[in-house]
Image (cartoon, rainbow, N blue to C red):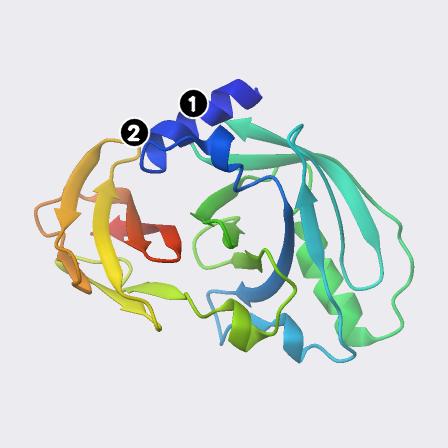
Amino acid sequence: MRKILLIILISFFSFQSFAQDSELFKTWYLYRMDFDFGEPQYVENIDPVISPYLTINESFEFNGFGACNSFSGSFIYTEGDFTLTPINFENTNIDCVHPEHILFEEGYFFQFSEGLLLYIVDLQETQFAFDQYPGFTYAFSNEPLSLKDNIINKIKIYPNPVSDILHISSENTEIESIFIYSLTGKKVLEGLNETNYIDVSTLSKGLYFIEISSSPGKSIKKFIKK
């Protein structure tokens, strides 16, 4: 199964060696949760303070910590879909004292429910994010830093869905290249260097991936062409 994952990621993430970089296999610290309603929620704003993390091993076994409980399980990668499916999830089931911690763990642990599909929507050397479906995203950093430190390279795309011009917002980051891929991994568009938009009007309706390269690394995001 791991060989299948490596082959797919080699072809999709700029055709570079995922095995060599091993971006996914490390400890990730959760710092932001995006939902399709309201504002993003930042872990640093939870009171009392918590430091949730997720460690993914090369065997695709994982472990981590929420607010009050540790957890473990395994992932299965689905060929062609860029998804991780959690199995065998277990947690220590210690009662949290603070209501905000209880609410956080209910949402966070739900993402690891048996059989759910977690779509990889961002994978860089320092950042990793997945969502269960568009609008519900959990974003991680490779260092347990404050919000200001770990979103220096935050990149957003809008509007999404898009009909013609897809804009790219990058904070403190100069964009080096923009590539758009179909679901099969075929490159269908290329943007100009140092621009913050790309014309997607010629694309057929459907789901695509955009790869945005900058000096800190690469960001992969999904968008819908309407």
Are the residues at dot 1 and dot 2 in contact (C-beta closer than 8 Å)? Answer: no
Q: Position of residue 85 (x, y in %)?
A: 60, 35
Q: Secondary structure at mark 2?
A: loop
Tell me which residue sits at (48%, 43%) in the image. 119
- Left or right for 82, reference 176: right
Q: Residues within 10 Å of mark 1 (few under 14, many from 20)?
A: some
Task: Looking at the image, tell me whether mark 1 or mark 2 is earlier in sequence order.
Answer: 1
In which quadrant will I find the N terminus?
top right
| Amino acid under disc 2 | Thr
Q: Amino acid at mark 1?
A: Ile
Asked whether 139 or 97 is in front, the reply is: 139
Q: Is residue 63 above or below residue 51?
A: above
Q: Residue 57 or 117: which is nearer the viewer?
A: 57
- Which mark, residue 62? none
Residue 184's disc is 2
For the residues labelled 1 and 2, the Cα–Cα distance comes to 13 Å
> Can you say whether 136 is above or below 116 in the image?
below
Residue positioned most to the left: 202
Q: Give the labeled residue for mark 1.
A: 7
User: x%, y% of residue 72?
Assistant: 78, 41
